[in-house]
Image (cartoon, rainbow, N blue to C red):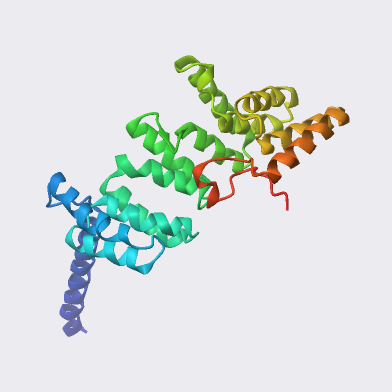
Amino acid sequence: MKYLKLPLLTLLFISTLNSCNQKEELKNSNEKSVSKFTEKQQDSLKEIYLKNGAWQTDVYSQEWQNEIDKGLEVDSTLAYFWQQKAMPLFKQSKYEIGMTFIDKAVKYNPERWQNYRAFIKCIFSKQYKDAINDFQDYQETYGYGFVMDHSYDFYIALSYLQLSEFEEAEKLFEKDYQRTLDKKGEDWLHHLDLFYYGISKYELKKYDEALVLFDQALARYPQFSDVQYYKAKILYKLGKPEEADSVYKSAKEYARKGFSINEDNVVYERYPYQIRWN
């Protein structure tokens, strides 16, 4: 048996060494890489592989992906290349593969792309808990801000709505509402923010408060059929059937004409609480 001790110890040493090497390799692969190119040189790469490459092809084609891959072979740290690979995949509901690419964009330029990834998780892939974590982490690092025309708190509150955590949603919508009033004034209140703030009140059965917010939204966007739909529901609950019938009829007519949530990305994704009439 004593002749087996040396080989066994040797094997254990080699195994431990290999394990350490693997951990070191993993650590190195997770570290942020720095491009060997200057910002001006990276702009030239974008010109070559995006403007004169991918952007000359169909955005949903394999050629689009192949042209960007050529650029990544030259500089795999260029975050915009990774975002451009991910973007059409999200629009095709290919969330899982798209997320692997946007994760790379965030790795190489978190300040530019982490808030975008959080938006994607909220509106596209419906990963609401992840969206909240991403936005909260981003705000802790870079501060309050906006992505796709709405504040980070708006998307966090919207995520809470979708998780049926209505009180948390209401608190954040209220905070953002007051911030807008204090910093910008009433004219800067957005009809979509008002709609979802009203929805949080609706879910909490604060019907009178919800109606005030819905009316504010309709003052900015009178044809907003989704707001009218929920307003009609509240009016029915409050025992005002005639007024409710009128509002519901108007909602249905405006919906038939295409007046609904008018965000740019609504052509790809149905937004929370958006009504399906058919």
Q: Quadrant of residue 98?
A: bottom left
Residue 152 x/y as whole percent: 45, 34
Name the residue: 78% across, 37% down: 248
Q: Is residue 249 above or below residue 101?
A: above
In the displayed structure, would residue 156 be above or below residue 125? above
> Residue 226 versus residue 31: which sits nearer the camera?
226
Residue 72 in view of the camera? yes
Left or right of 15 on screen, residue 145: right
Q: Position of residue 224 (x, y in %)?
A: 65, 35
Between 146 and 191, which is closer to the camera in this rendering?
191
Q: Position of residue 12 (x, y in %)?
A: 21, 72
Asked whether, in this view, residue 218 is left or right of residue 136, the answer is right
As drawn, is 125 to the left or to the right of 13?
right
**Residue 268 percent location from the top left of the image:** 53, 52
Quadrant, the N terminus: bottom left
The residue at the point 20 percent across, 57 percent down is 48
- Residue 34 visible in rendering: no
- Above or below, 75 against 149 in this view is below
Seen from the viewer's position, the closer of residues 187 and 109 is 187
The relative height of residue 70 versus residue 230 in the rendered view (above or below) is: below
The residue lying at 12 percent from left, 51 percent from top is 37
